[in-house]
Image: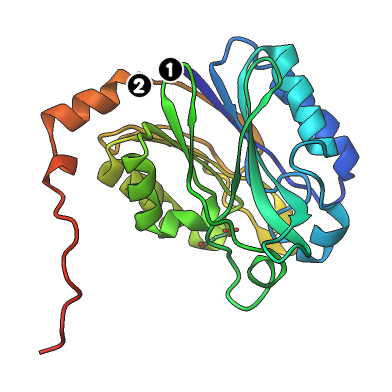
């Protein structure tokens, strides 16, 4: 299985309409890949909070969804199109924003959406402007089950446990990770692969937007925790071959997941 992570430079001087066209062109150039992955919020920029409202769109029929559906169809590839700022009714029926990932099959059909569960920013940015998703999502690709997570989700292993329990073999993580915490990124991507005994495909952005330098360093890690491919800091396509059968083989030969003990009580301070 051939996968390509498209590490996009989110340049605030590039118009979003232009970036959409450019990224669609990059996806179209990936004919022959089995899976193409884009980063988190690449149209607007993960830290461009002041633009989230103006750039919010429908996850099913917005300009990014339409451009990415067409690009996936033209290239004949499965496409994890990263995420967009989705505008949709919240649980109370009022207008809400979500950080929503989109996955397309090669016929251009939207196979899955995933609303980021853990919002980043503490009391600012995404954490205050966006609503949280509440549903872990897995997607059946012809070669493997994909488990979806987004950026800050990487810090929450309990989500990845649920994805593994849901059958995930390849964990796909679009991100807009700051360069300041590159060491955390590399460690967490590898940790999620080792503990899940799964591939992790983690696709970040390049460049600096809203004053936040992005880490780049998109990574593909195998179920043993080995880094198969890693990007630099600029825009680039990181391509690698992976063998989904290695997930079951690793879980069989080193059966850590089988040894989980569930339902333990909370410890009492003594
Ligand atoms: O957890 C981090 O350090 C970065 C997370 C982040 O940038 C995000 O989720 O957008």
Question: In the rendered view, does 10 fall on the left or right side of 242?
Answer: right
Query: How many numbered marks are there?
Result: 2
Question: In the rendered view, does 133 fall on the left or right side of 249?
Answer: right
Residue occupying image coordinates x 78% and y 51%: 44
Residue occupying image coordinates x 50% and y 47%: 149
Residue occupying image coordinates x 62% and y 21%: 105
Residue 123: image quadrant is bottom right
Residue 227: image quadrant is top left
**Residue linked to disc 1:** 143
Question: In the rendered view, does 69 fall on the left or right side of 113?
Answer: right
Q: Are the residues tagged 2 and 1 within 8 Å (C-beta)?
A: yes
Q: Is residue 200 above or below residue 184?
A: above
CA distance separating discs 2 and 1: 7 Å
Q: Position of residue 132 (x, y in %)?
A: 60, 61
**Residue linked to disc 2:** 244
Q: How many other residues sit within 10 Å of disc 1, few (<14), some (14-19) or many (≥20)?
A: some
Image region (quadrant) for ligand 1 = bottom right
Q: How many other residues sit within 10 Å of disc 2, few (<14), some (14-19) or many (≥20)?
A: some
Front one among 109 and 149: 109
> Label 2's element?
loop
Choose the circle earlier in sequence order: 2 or 1.
1
In this view, the residue farthest toward the bottom is 270
Question: In the rendered view, does 68 fall on the left or right side of 156?
Answer: right
Q: Quadrant of the N terminus?
A: top left
Q: Position of residue 30 (x, y in %)?
A: 65, 17
């Amino acid at each position: 299985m051939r996968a390509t992570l498209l590490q996009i430079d989110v340049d605030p001087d590039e118009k979003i309409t232009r970036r959409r066209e450019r990224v669609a062109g990059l996806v179209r150039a990936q004919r022959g890949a089995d899976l193409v992955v884009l980063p988190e919020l690449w149209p607007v920029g993960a830290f461009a909070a002041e633009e989230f409202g103006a750039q919010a769109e429908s996850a099913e029929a917005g300009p990014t969804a339409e451009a990415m559906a067409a690009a996936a169809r033209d290239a004949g590839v499965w496409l994890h199109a990263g995420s967009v700022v989705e505008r949709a009714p919240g649980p109370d029926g009022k207008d809400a924003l979500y950080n929503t990932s989109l996955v397309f099959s090669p016929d251009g059909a939207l196979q899955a959406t995933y609303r980021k569960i853990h919002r980043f920013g503490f009391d600012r940015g995404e954490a205050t402007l966006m609503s949280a998703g509440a549903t872990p999502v897995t997607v059946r690709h012809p070669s493997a089950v994909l488990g979806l997570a987004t950026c800050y989700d990487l810090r929450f292993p309990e989500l990845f446990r649920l994805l593994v329990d849901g059958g995930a073999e390849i964990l796909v993580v679009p991100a807009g990770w700051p360069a300041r915490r590159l060491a955390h990124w590399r460690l967490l991507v590898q940790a999620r692969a080792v503990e899940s005994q799964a591939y992790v495909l983690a696709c970040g952005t390049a460049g600096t937007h809203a004053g936040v330098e992005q880490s780049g360093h998109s990574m593909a890690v195998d179920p043993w925790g080995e880094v198969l491919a890693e990007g630099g800091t600029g825009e680039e396509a990181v391509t690698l071959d992976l063998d989904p059968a290695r997930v079951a083989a690793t879980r069989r030969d080193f059966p850590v997941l089988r040894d989980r003990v569930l339902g333990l009580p909370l410890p009492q301070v003594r």
